[in-house]
Image (spheres, rainbow, N blue to C red):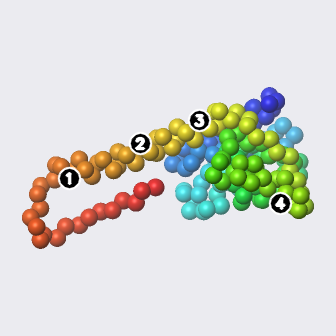
Amino acid sequence: MSAADEQAMRIALDQAQNAWLVGEVPVGAVIMRAGQVIATGYNRPITEHDPTAHAEIVALRHAAQLLANYRLPECELYVTLEPCAMCAMALMHARFKRVVFGARDPKTGAAGSVVNLFEQPQLNHHTALEGGVLADECAAVLREFFAERREQYRQRRAAPDAAAAEAPDIPAGEATEIEVTPAR
């Protein structure tokens, strides 16, 4: 891992923290060109009601706007989690020179964990790929986020039981309203 790769991944980790702060899965991305930050992004599908608002896509959209081109052949993307298939194809379509990721994604990773779209010989563009940069730190952020989420879920589930124990008895036959809170 080069010093430049580590520095860029730390910027991506900062973006992941931004996602966590707004309640999104903490994935962050940064796009670099010739050692300079072009654009950053973090996960926003929940807050923007947009299933495509992954960190990579958010950063890609910003970079394309700033550079006034949908092709970004001199750019490198750093992301804290292995890209999914949607993000991998968008990055290849934009002709990225290189994609660097931190933690592997064993459920939806499209850069080697589940499938490696970057190595498909049928595709007309091939992007250099490097995984595992600051992998432990990137994975730790995700583990801590999901541990916190699980604890919040447990507390929400326990709260109605405690409230029911303290609630007055309702005689049989009387109508009551039940509030259902979906789990997320």
184 relative to 25 in the view: left or right: left
* Res. 57 image quadrant: bottom right
139 relative to 3 in the view: left or right: left
Most extreme residue toward the top, as rendered?
3
Q: Is residue 4 visible?
A: yes
Across and down, in percent, residue 12 comes to 69, 40
Q: CA distance from mark 2 to mark 4?
A: 40 Å
Disc 3, disc 4: CB below 8 Å? no
Q: Secondary structure at mark 1?
A: helix
Q: Amino acid at mark 4?
A: His
Q: Which residue was labeled with disc 3?
A: 140
Q: Residue at x 73, y 42 (%)?
A: 101
Disc 1, disc 3: CB below 8 Å? no
What number is the disc on residue 151? 2
Who comes first in sequence, dot 3 or dot 2? Answer: 3
Q: CA distance from mark 3 to mark 2?
A: 16 Å
